[in-house]
Amino acid sequence: MTDFRAHRSALYLPAANARAIEKARTLDADVVILDLEDAVAPDAKPAARAAAVDAVKAGGWGRRAVAIRVNGIGTDWCEADFLAVQSANPAAVVVPKVSSAAEAAEAVRLANGVPVWAMIETPRGVQAVDAIADTPGVAALVVGAADLEKDLGCRVGPTRAEIQYALQRVVIAARAAGILAFDAMYPDIKDMEGLEVVTLQGKALGFDGKTLIHPAQIETANRVFSPSAEEVEQAHRIVAAFEAAKADGKGVATLDGKIVEVLHAAQAQDLIALAKSIAHP
């Protein structure tokens, strides 16, 4: 991946909640997602749609990327939502329940140039995730665990073992396509210990960041998905060791008794670039 802008935390906010939107301009989230889907009642959707457009156009978001989550392809609100997205021109449009490459392509067509973040939250979506990720115009995959859990008929426990396969499929598809991957939101806003566990798990699996439903969850996501000072220092050492070896005409280096190859140097350079984007957004 070549986009080193931090995407550690992506906070969902009801687009109809003007107070929450104003507060979001002061929060430390990397991404704010103005929601027109689950967080908005049917009769409130037109007003929420207009509010989302106004919020994006008004600006004042600083380093934060602003996305809009529309209602799904084929719903009564879909067409109007996408027209609003075209008018607002946010950083991305988040599309729920994308279950096939055809649906992904339709979302891209409707978005008319706005990058599509496809939500993988159905069994068919998991099955088709490779083709969805490879669809031109799709810039990210977003796990929707609640709907996936419902459709699977399973009960997800603290380790998320029940959906590990789906999580790994999403990360692999995103990496193969060179796009972003966001882990699912954690529904218990009071369980900070549980949030820590699943966020660390998401980082270990390879996700770029996590979707959130409450401002109190931002600190955990930002901390976990940020390179530590020790990791940055080690990355600089790896790059320096490899460059020194290359200057001597060698294809590999050794550092602390371990082999350093070009792939390790590339990983280290990516980590350094991410750290710089966080420190100097």
Image (spheres, helix red, strand yellow):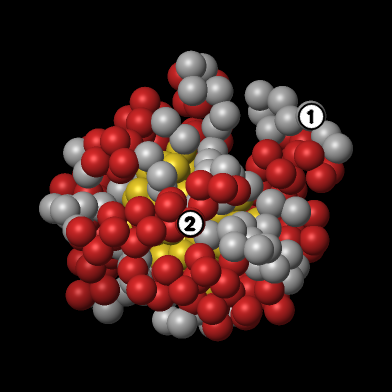
Q: In terms of secondary structure, where does tag 1 sit?
A: loop
Mark nearer the viewer, 2 or 1: 2
In this view of the protein, which residue sits in the foreground, 40 or 141? 40
- What residue appears at the point 55 percent right and 83 percent down from the top-left corner? 109
Give the mark nearest the N terminus, 2 or 1: 2
Please give left or right for residue 255 compared with residue 212 in the image: left
Whether residue 32 is situated above or below residue 105 in the rendered picture: above
Residue 245 is situated, as x and y percent measured from the top left of the image, at: 26, 68
Q: Label 2: which residue?
A: 46
- What residue appears at the point 35 percent right and 49 percent down from the top-left corner? 32
Occupied quadrant, residue 13: top left
Label number found at residue 155: 1
In this view of the protein, which residue sits in the foreground, 220 or 10? 10
Residue 126 is situated, as x and y percent measured from the top left of the image, at: 74, 58
Q: Residue furthest left?
A: 280
Whether residue 155 is situated above or below residue 239 in the rendered picture: above
Q: How many marks?
A: 2
Label number found at residue 105: none
Q: Residue furthest front?
A: 43
Whether residue 236 is situated above or below residue 147 in the rendered picture: below
Please give left or right for residue 238 compared with residue 166 in the image: left
Residue 50 is situated, as x and y percent measured from the top left of the image, at: 38, 59
Residue 78 is situated, as x and y percent measured from the top left of the image, at: 59, 66
Q: In terms of secondary structure, where does tag 2 sit?
A: helix
Please give left or right for residue 197 compared with residue 15 in the image: right
Instruction: Estimate the spatial distance between the alpha carbons at disc 2 and disc 1, rounded to whole Å.
Output: 35 Å
- What residue appears at the point 66 percent right and 63 percent down from the top-left corner? 76
Camera sees residue 225: no
Q: Amino acid at mark 2?
A: Pro
- What residue appears at the point 47 percent right and 35 percent down from the top-left corner? 213
